[in-house]
Image (cartoon, rainbow, N blue to C red):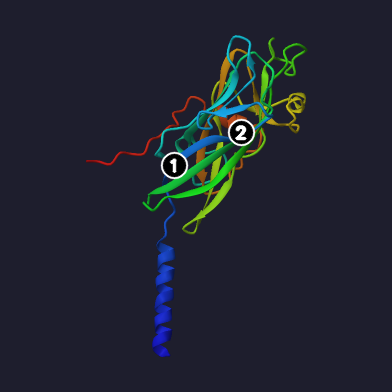
Amino acid sequence: MKHLKTTLIAAAALMMGAQASAAMVETWEVDIAGTWTAQGPAGVIRDLADTRLRWGTSTGFGQSSLVITNPVPNLSLDTYVGAGVPPAANIVQTLTLTHNNNPIQGTSLQSAQLTVSLSLAPLVPVAPGFPLPTIDYAIKFLETSNDNSCEVATSPTPCNDIFVLTEGLLNEGFNYDGYFYYVNAFPIGGSGQLQTLDDSVCAAAGADPNCLGFTTVEGQSNNLIFGLAISTEPLSVPEPAGLALVGLALAGAGWARRRPQAQA
């Protein structure tokens, strides 16, 4: 019995030592990809390996579309230790969402779901990689009619279309090796400036007041660039207005980071 007790104490000590030696992940390898997984109404077409939605009958300029451009694999991202707005050094540029806004007739997009898959592998310290549950971003969309007063009062004629993000973004949490981390996705740039839209604009798109979105100019390609941060605390950027400030604060910074190449 004394020998068994001694063995249990030794085993407990080993376990405590193993837990004590577990280190927070300082740097991650990130692989991320987005696809469209739902759209409405019927008649909206999903193609190009589910990275494009297109709709409407062309009036000579082509259909309108929403296109996802995914990043290169093996991005490198340092953990942000803290809360609030992470610095540019702790943000990696990920996918770009482009709305090709063409004058059309017929069926128009009204809603969509963007699903993002994310795989992480600790680089510092090195450890096996693992996938996280997918993150869904719900989108509401209004293709304006252009034959009445514009839903966006400040819009030129033809009227701007309305794009609204309603779910996703900050503080998706996971536990790894005894530490808790938060995955945060938010817009960091692009020609479409994300902002809190007027309540009348939100209502026109079927969204709640104070919705977060941007309006897109007819006859142009309007894009929104997303960044990713992994933090040790929930980010306290207020939604939705604070996310627009993140985009403004980080505009022009160099976010994209590739995994360091091994030395020969």
Q: Is residue 100 above or below residue 170?
A: above
> Which percent across, then down, holds residue 203?
77, 27
Q: Does the rendering let one see residue 83?
A: no
Number of other residues with Cα within 10 Å of mark 2, as a class: few under 14, some 14 to 19, many 20 or more: many
Quarter where residue 9 is shown = bottom left
Image quarter in which the C terminus is found: top left
Residue that sits furthest to the left in the current view: 264
The residue that disc 1 covers is 30
As measured in the structure, the alpha-carbon distance from the residue carrying label 2 to the one carrying label 1 is 22 Å
Q: Does the rendering let one see residue 229?
A: yes
SS at mark 1 in the image: strand
Residue that sits furthest to the bottom in the current view: 1
> Which percent across, then down, holds residue 5?
43, 85
Number of other residues with Cα within 10 Å of mark 1, as a class: few under 14, some 14 to 19, many 20 or more: many
Looking at the image, which residue is at 40% across and 66% down?
Answer: 18
Q: Nearer the viewer, residue 121 or 27?
A: 121
Q: Which tag is nearer the camera, tag 2 or tag 1?
A: 1
The residue that disc 2 covers is 243
Mark 1 residue type: Val
Image quarter in which the N terminus is found: bottom left
Looking at the image, which residue is at 49% across and 59% down?
Answer: 178
Q: Which mark is residue 138?
A: none
> Which percent across, then down, holds residue 199?
76, 27
- Looking at marks 2 and 1 on the same chain, the residue that comes earlier in the sequence is marked by 1
Mark 2 residue type: Leu
Quarter where residue 8 is shown = bottom left
